[in-house]
Amino acid sequence: MHIEMVDLKGQYEKIKPEVDAAIQHVIDTTSFIRGPEVAAFEKELGHYLQGNDVLSVANGTDALQIALMALGIGPGDEVISPSFTFVATAEAVGLLGATPVFADINPKTFTIDPDQVAALITERTKAIVPVHLFGQCANMSAILELAEKYGIPVIEDTAQAVGAQWEGKAAGTMGELGTLSFFPSKNLGCYGDGGAIVSRDESLLATCRLISNHGSTKKYHNEVVGVNSRLDTMQAAILRVKLGHLGEYTNARIQAADLYDALIAPISGLTTPYRDPRGSHVFHQYTLRVEGNDPEKRDALMAYLGSKGIPSFVYYPVPLHLLPIYKNDPESCRFGDMTETMKAANEVLSLPMHTELTHEQQTYIVGHCKDFLE
């Protein structure tokens, strides 16, 4: 049985006529940069995100950096984010000469712990960047309450959670800014790189637009130091097609997660993903805990699954505060207690999760998890 961690080919084959026609239209019009498809995609995505404004950019990391730049983040400033995530969140902070400050996570959701955030706030804290990890929102109620109390802006890293909600509000739309990634494996992915910035503040998004276009609103009249970051028209055209299917993609992921939950429930030693009832989970990843705080046991299960043709992956084996970037230069970051982050790094294992999973494949996957553990 052939199983993919992410089956992009199978997904493409189902929408091939739509995608091919969209690509051909861009080629026929030769509007490769800032073509009409870009503006149309921004408008349609904004509508999907409950009427918020959208600026498309070249990738998710650029989206984070531009958002931080728009808030004036620079040397001497601190930005709080989780350590249990992909490096891009902290990388964007470091590129601006600011200091990343890492907070521990909630052990159920793997998202940033608001109590840990509160303990790390100082007069140098200029932004909080919660990461909506694996497809589920962080506790935005508590985070926004902290942000209001201390007057600190919030940038939501929504790279893994487009389509998720928190108390009825779309992920990426609750803070001053939200950032998205359209990397191919994402829930809404293009066929290359792409990203976006979302905001309810038109003035702030205008600043992001200025920065993303070489710091210029008028050609050859640059106003600030900016960057060159834009979504090309081909990717926008593809994303318009896939946005039209995002609802069915999300439902397919949730149904696959429901089946995993049911199949795994009788197996001792595995903890299925927690779903916070205040929000929704769109399952960018289906991430288990292999109980015991023993990475060797988890890695042995991963190797066993691999021997049966079943891919799996560890997101994330090394917390950010232990990466060589920061470990070799203690002054380059700051962090608090990391008990839950370290335990998660030792226990998590993500199983195949995508829109094309079949009942037969999932039964095969979980059957071999059961064989190994029992």
Image: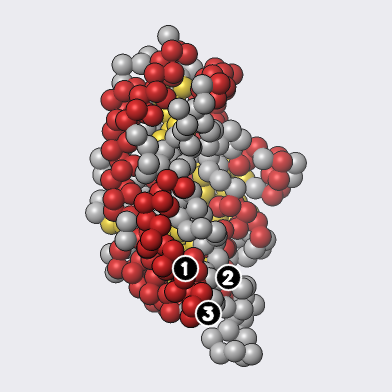
Which residue is at a point 48% across and 80% down the rendered structure image?
29
Which disc is residue 123 wearing? Answer: none
> Which of the marked residues, 2 or 3, is nearer the chain's N terminus?
3
Which disc is residue 30 wearing? Answer: 3
> Which of the marked residues, 2 or 1, is nearer the chain's N terminus?
1
Circle 1 SS class? helix
For the residue marked with disc 1, what is the amino acid?
Ile
Measure how far apart labels 1 and 3 are at the Cα level: 10 Å
For the residue marked with disc 3, what is the amino acid?
Thr
Which residue is at a point 38% across and 66% down the rendered structure image?
240
Where is 138 relative to 180, above or below?
Answer: above
Which residue is at a point 54% across and 59% down the rendered structure image?
192
Q: Residues within 10 Å of mark 1 (few under 14, many from 20)?
A: some
| Residue 156 place in picture, x, y as percent | 44, 56
Where is 156 relative to 106, above or below?
Answer: below
Residue marked by disc 1 = 23
Residue marked by disc 2 = 229
Q: Quadrant of the C terminus?
A: top left
Counting the numbered discs, the total is 3
> Which of the marked residues, 1 or 3, is nearer the chain's N terminus?
1
| Residue 150 place in picture, x, y as percent | 43, 58
For the residue marked with disc 2, what is the amino acid?
Ser
Circle 3 SS class? loop
Comparing 117 with 198, the one in front is 198
| Residue 230 place in picture, x, y as percent | 54, 71
